[in-house]
Image (spheres, rainbow, N blue to C red):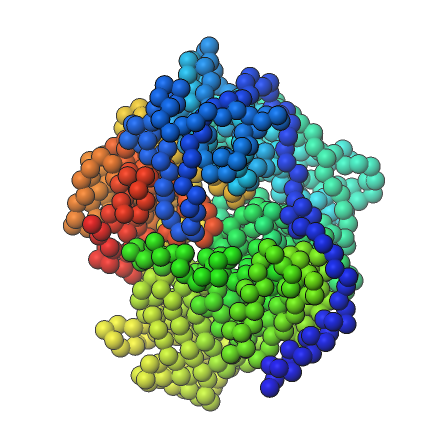
Amino acid sequence: MRIGLILSLCFLSANLVAQTKVTGNVVEYFGKEKIVTTAEGNVLHQFSDGYFLPADKKNGTLFNGQDPVAWQYAVGKFINPNKQKGDWQPIKQDSVGVFSQKEMKSAFLFTEYNSPKEQIALLETTGGTRTYINGMPHEGDHYDFGYTLIPFKLRKGTNEFVYTKGRFGKVKSKIVIPSKSILFTKRDLTLPDVISGEKDEKWASIRVINATEKDLKNLVITAKLSSGETATYATDNIMPLFVRKVKFKVPAAKADYTGELKMKLTLSDKNGKVIDETEIPIQQRSATVHHERTFLSKVDNSVQYYSVAPALGSGPKALVLSVHGASVEARNQARAYKQKDWATIVAATNRRPFGFNWEDWGRIDALEVLAEAKKVFNTIPSQTYLTGHSMGGHGTWFLGTTYPGKFAAIAPCASYPDIATYGFDKGDEMNDQFKAFESIKRSANSGHVKSIVKNLKQSGVYILHGDADSTVPISQVREMRQILSTFHPNFCYYEYPGGEHWYGDHSVDWFPIFEFFKRQSIPANKEVKEIDFYTATPAVSSTDYWIKLQQQIRPFDFSNINAKIDKQQINIKTDNVSILELDLPSLELKDEITININDQALKTTADKKVILALKDGKWAFINEINTAEKYADRQGGFKFAFNNNIVFVYATGGSAPEREWYQNRARFDAETFYYRGNGSIDVIPDSEFSLEKYKDQNVIIYGNASNNKAWNLLLKNSPIQINNQQVKVGDKILKGDDLAAYFVLPRKDSKIAMVGVVAGTSEAGMKATWANNYISGITGFPDVMIFKADLLLKGLPEMKVTGFFDNDWSTKTLEFLN
């Protein structure tokens, strides 16, 4: 009866303020301008004709790794179509210089250039997801931003370029000779606003092109504002033939400066010699109006920004986190909201306008912005809320269910709960091809909102959706309304009459949502008498108020902890739980209490936190977590190796092809993390790595025990050992020159850091690792994947070993296939 009453009141309030329908597309409304001018040098050649190869149109959300061109390069079977066409068909650019024919919606594109001499150039591409330059993989421009500049060495004679399909089915490509060997590019700046009256320097970042074959070290960037202030910063090192987005400091400006503010940037070496200079405009704004702020991410020490619609007036206020839709910039998301007198609204970036669907590194970005905004604005902790539109509506469902206790209420707008079923309405049918690889499918479980939706029990929920939405079917939220009605006492649901996907700013800035928010607050732990907590992995979500899951029995399978307080007793039922922690002091119980866990009674005092561990079917108290085992702060799968101040370490041993290839493999991942996640990663040779210098940082090893010097420092006792002839997994040996592996293990010298491995046996094996889907939203990667190069052609049937290490990081629970 209570649910029905709340729903009726919500319908009434919404109708009172409903506005006239406004048509429009959120992508067009919030889109970002594309870079169209080449200012970094002179165009040597623009490609106007080539060949295309039709490709498989399948595109699932889990790992498959298929790429027939990559396979051909890996096993030495690629043939230039100019020499033997095979299935390649000729194609020419259109009237505006773009390869855009309908065939390009799902096709590889081949072009070539015959160079009269060897020289370093830039390949500027738009449209393709990945580019192979003379057989070496590089990140492309999947979203057609116009950011991609790839320094490479032109060979004398024939140079081959292959582009994989992008989002929009069109590719434009040209070779540019850079005006300098080291220079700034103003494409894709990350800048804060200069806030009037604030005296601290702000973080910013700009890309520097290293069109040389040497590492750039000890660089210094000086920023000078047109108002006269200067800040100097010793910035990041840059690997050879790479474009890195490097940090610098923006000085505070004079509060009374009224002119158009500009900033001159100077790049110098350690001796003060000027390498390059540029000038850029920068906004100066009051902290009382919409503005942008920056911070350093703990993922990779890169500069990220968030946008703010500050609360009107002074004093502590509520905080609303808003998460944007696909293609939407955070600065535009924030400006869709009018300022409120009771709440500050902050918009996170997801690291990019498309980003990671608010999962993976998008999830981390949202949490980092939330923590940063709480600190900067000194908000009221119990009055924290979450909302978002479209992909951000999914982000609202995902973040709200994943982090119970962080938000008093959530409001998904134009939303869908699960990425895997968006647009399909077919449950898990789309993943049937992965059922034979249960661990791979399981590793994507953390994105299944409907499986953890009961975590919302303590949070208010307001659902807003246009009833004429042709982008996200209304069936998506009608199903969620039905699910919530079975258990949730505090939710509202409203369908906007005639509303398309975007019908004006009130698609997000909806008065009843904020009125609903005002009535909600996060309860104190002592007020939460019942918890029904679900999670797929404590690596993503471990805590629900006073309960923390520290370890699972089956990694990435759903865990449930149902707990109820009854006077001096806590009654707990668990599923897939091996270690849990209870914050008893926060409950303010008294004296001795009884914990009944799975019908086993244990007594303790209420004045201390307790840790319960399951061993041999019996629960017992333990004094501390064994951090050498899996626990909440350090778990698999493989993608979590990229979460903690990562450094990429490439092999310098072995043959010349091995050295070249592993360096490029690390470069490729750094390019991809930059493009998809606005990242900036230290990439170093193994000769420069030391345990102390990179203490407590996650490390990605590119290479094997035969060629990477860091292997012995980090992986000497690893249960998986790889050289150029074989892969040894525990006591089993897989032989072959075409085996590839991804796996993750803890750093033995750290309680928190991890080591990820990208390695292969011999040339075909190392090239088999070209499939880097792991830098992508919601793809499933368990702890270990070992596969043959033929996976690039045939897909998952070529997987040899997969699965999760046991809780002691042993190999006994891994799956050995065919």
Q: Is 476 left, or right, of 198 in this rendering?
A: left
Q: How many numbered circles does the render carry?
A: 0
Note whether 462 is above or below 693 in the view shown: below
Q: Is 630 left, or right, of 241 in this rendering?
A: left
- Which of the two residues, 187 or 498, is positioned nearer the viewer here? 498
* Residue displayed at 16% across by 50% down: 731
Q: Is 452 left, or right, of 630 in this rendering?
A: right
**Which quadrant would residue 523 be assigned to in this image?**
bottom right
Note whether 122 is above or below 308 in the view shown: above
Residue 651 placement (x, y as % from top left): 33, 33
Q: Is residue 96 visible?
A: yes
**Which quadrant would residue 582 be assigned to in this image?**
bottom left
Residue 330 placement (x, y as % from top left): 64, 50
Q: Is 657 left, or right, of 275 in this rendering?
A: left
Note whether 290 is above or below 683 in the view shown: below
* Residue displayed at 68% across by 61% down: 499
